[in-house]
Image (cartoon, helix red, strand yellow):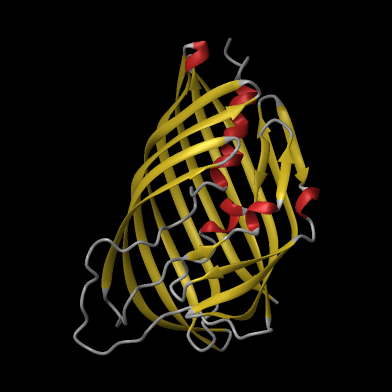
Amino acid sequence: MKTKYFGKLAVIVYILIFSGICSSVYAQKKTEVASAKAGVKLEYKYPEGKKFKYISDSKIVQDMDVNGQSMLVNVAMYMVSQVKATGKAGENLKLEITVDSMAQNIESPQGSTGGPIVDVKGKAFNMIISPAGKAVDLTEAAKVVYTIEGSGENNLTQAFLNFFPALPAGAVNPGDTWVTSDTISSTSPTNKMWMPVESTYKYEGTETIDGIDCAKISATLSGTRKMVTKSQGMEIHTSGPYTGTQIVLLSLKEGVLLKETVTNKMTGTIEIPDQNMSFPVVMNVTGTTEVVK
């Protein structure tokens, strides 16, 4: 009984990676703190025709308590992608995204599974983002479909929904803070998610990294996550509060994301209603997206 459903539970961790567990949100429903000076306007620009290569690396450690026994699942996700601006759509940016490679690995008491996700290797699609980073159009990403054994069919929408971290709506000076509050709601063939989140941001100022002047933004994240996942004939409910931190580095001249680092911890419950089973769970997440040469 202790391990009968454990392998099936492990797959929901993979789905969480692409469902906002390492992401921030964009709608600024609370008033941004006004600055006494003109400040600097932070925005994505991406010079047209120039390619930027990114490595995204996410790790999750999931600890479940099953009938008093601690069971660990370690998940690693890795993606290499390229971003190229192809023009403007009004004030927004048109980007061409190419996925060079993607892989995932799950280690649990039942052993290791995973490897390269060959369905997406070399696939390209177009998307549109606002200067503040909001995904305006991901229609083509939804058409890039892939399947992982045990977790069903998915597409690239969730992987790129929050790929570009949110930037402030107005000009900011070092020390300025602002708060965003929103609810992320998404549905895919294998899961539904509802996640209210509040993020408190601070503009730390500028740093020079490898000769590039960068804007640095920090944030504290908090909220609640609720998911319903369908896997191997079961419906799995995952819910609980989470807290986290985020650091963003943006090149001031070109308006290019240089690096984002997110840490996230959720303490909650996994339930399988059909089996009348419930387990406490703690998920610790670290995620990094960084431009490389």
Observer-nearest of 109 and 181: 181
**As drawn, which residue projects farthest toward the front?**
90
Quadrant showing the C terminus: bottom right
Which residue sits at x=26%, y=75%? 176
Answer left or right for 207 relative to 95: left
Q: Nearer the viewer, residue 182 or 71?
A: 182
Q: Residue at x 58, y 26 (%)?
A: 9
Q: Percent from the top left, x then y, of residue 178?
A: 27, 68
Name the residue located 35 percent from the left edge and 86 percent from the top edge. Answer: 40
Is 20 on the left or on the right of 100, as rendered? left
In-front residue for pair 234/286: 234
Residue 211: x and y, percent? 56, 89
When asked about the image quadrant of residue 141, the answer is bottom right
Numbered circles on residues, count: 0
Residue at the (54%, 74%) spot, across then down: 257
Residue 47 sits above or below residue 30 on the image: below
Asked if residue 97 lies left or right of residue 283, the reply is: right
Along the horizontal axis of the image, is 226 left or right of 17?
A: left
Q: Where in the figure is residue 49, as x and y percent of width and height?
A: 69, 84
Vertically, is 24 above or below 32? Answer: above
Name the quadrant of the N terminus.
top right
Where 225 sits versus 18, above or below? above
